[in-house]
Amino acid sequence: MVQAQIMDLLDRLRRELNLALIVVTHDLGVVAEYCQQTLVMYGGRVAEYGSVAQIFDTPRHPYTQRLLAAFPTIDAPRGSFVGIPGTPPSLSQLPTGCRFHPRCTQAIERCTLETPLLRASITGQAVACHLAE
């Protein structure tokens, strides 16, 4: 209740004063409700960027896909969401290449060797993944 009141107040001030607002959160519900653009990060790097609709409807990075699959929805059967295997990397011992590759079920050898560049598509959605090239 308090979170919703604060977010409503920030949203009202944003509209009235014509401001930009950056919300840093792990709460996908807040993102879906209050944000227009979404930047997904993993291990201190951008994994994916796009509109809320693009990210929620057509996630292109394996981390974004797994993150959304791990988020319970009201119409999904109870307990049907799947967690992300493994553990997040220590920021003092980050893996080479794509930082998500140790937990990625789609990783290829290139993912372990080369850091993927953030590349935008013609829709404006951008992803940093070798598999999305």
Image (cartoon, rainbow, N blue to C red):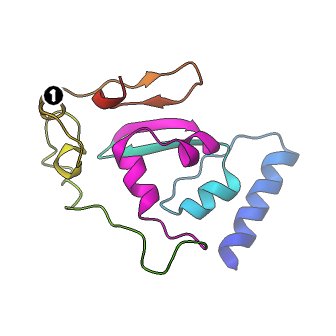
* Residue 114 within the segment the image draws in magenta: no
Instruction: Give the quadrant of residue 83.
Output: bottom left
Task: For label 1, count other residues whose C-alpha is less than 10 Å away and answer few (under 14), some (14-19) or many (20+).
Answer: some
Q: Give the residue at x 59% y 24%.
A: 123
Q: Give the residue at x 23% y 48%.
A: 104
The x and y percentages for residue 73 are 56, 69
The foreground one among 130 and 38 is 130
The x and y percentages for residue 16 are 88, 47
Instruction: Give the quadrant of residue 109.
Output: top left
* Residue 60 within the segment the image draws in magenta: yes
Give the residue type that dot 1 points to. Arg
Seen as rendered, the residue at the extreme front is 77
Number of labelled discs? 1
Placement of 28 over or under 20, stated as above or below? below
The x and y percentages for residue 50 are 56, 35
Taking the image as shown, residue 80 lies to the left or right of residue 33, namely left
Q: Which residue is mark 1?
A: 110
Q: Quadrant of the N terminus?
A: bottom right
Taking the image as shown, residue 45 lies to the left or right of residue 24, namely left
Seen as rendered, the residue at the extreme right is 16
Placement of 28 over or under 112, stated as above or below? below
Report helix, strand or loop for mark 1. helix
Seen as rendered, the residue at the extreme top is 122
Q: Quadrant of the C terminus?
A: top left
The x and y percentages for residue 6 are 71, 67
Look at the image and give the residue range highlighted in magenta. Answer: 45-74
Placement of 108 over or under 13, stated as above or below? above
Q: Give the residue at x 62% y 45%.
A: 52
Instruction: Give the quadrant of residue 85.
Output: bottom left
